Amino acid sequence: IIQPIFMVGARGCGKTTVGRALAQALGFQFTDTDLILLQSTGLSVAQIVEQEGWAGFRTRESDILHGVASADGRQVVATGGGIILSEANRRFMRATGTVFYLHAPADVLARRLEAVPEEDQRPSLTGRPIAEEIAEILLAREALYQDAAHHVLDAGQPPQDVVSAVLQRLCPCAA
Ligand code: ADP
Ligand code: MG
């Protein structure tokens, strides 16, 4: 049985970038829970949060997670950075797929997000400078990412190297 691959990690760790390349390498479909939200509602994450609050967004996100996982297993699923806040989501991903945590330090994430701020227009969670905010979020969520993941990878390396690392974890014999 082929299971979906879930990419988890903080904003900017490369879930979308690496996930897309990984799907291509495997001949899998690529799915992004944030993108599905946008396509199904016509609203961005920021707009959903504005209209329904974070709780509303989280509920929609969990529904989307269950929806994509019930589809064909041959897919790579990039998730939202906060999907792991729900214990049910963590357990669900671990049980139904293979979960990769793309781990990178806060300063690396901050540099990436500051380089292309328009690419990720999420509302600030705290209203403070981005590096500070990311460091705090990472501290709070690190254990949850670890808890959700079957594999932890260094997301500070170039995207293609992260893809190679995933492939090696999936099939050590091919290395
Ligand atoms: P996420 O989906 O986890 O929020 P993205 O894939 O959107 O992260 O990447 C955020 C930004 O960081 C993008 O501009 C992307 O090009 C860049 N990026 C992603 N992964 C890497 C990497 N391994 N090395 C360098 N830059 C990266
Ligand atoms: Mg993304």
Image (spheres, rainbow, N blue to C red):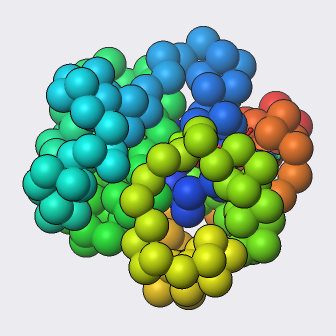
In the image, residue 66 sits, relative to residue 111, either above or below, namely: above
Residue found at x 43% / y 27%:
31
Q: How many marks?
A: 0
Could you tell whether 49 is left or right of 153 in the image?
A: left
**Rendering coords of residue 87 (x, y %):** 25, 71
- Which residue is painted at 54% across and 80% down in the image? 128
Query: From the viewer's perspective, is residue 143 above or below residue 93?
Result: below
Q: Residue furthest top?
A: 27
Residue 7, percent across and down? 53, 47
Q: Quadrant of the N terminus?
A: top left
Q: Is residue 162 left or right of residue 26?
A: right
Residue 166 placement: quadrant: top right
**Above or below: residue 62 compared with residue 87:** above
Q: Quadrant of the C terminus?
A: top right
* Quadrant of the image where one finds ligand 1: top right
- Where's residue 168, x and y in %? 77, 42
Question: Can you see residue 110?
Answer: yes
Residue 68 visible at all: no
What residue lies at 50% left-to-right and 22% top-to-bottom? 30
Q: Nearer the viewer, residue 40 or 87?
A: 40
Residue at image location 45% in from the left, 67% down from the top:
124
Query: Measured from the top left, where is residue 60 in percent x and y?
Result: 16, 46
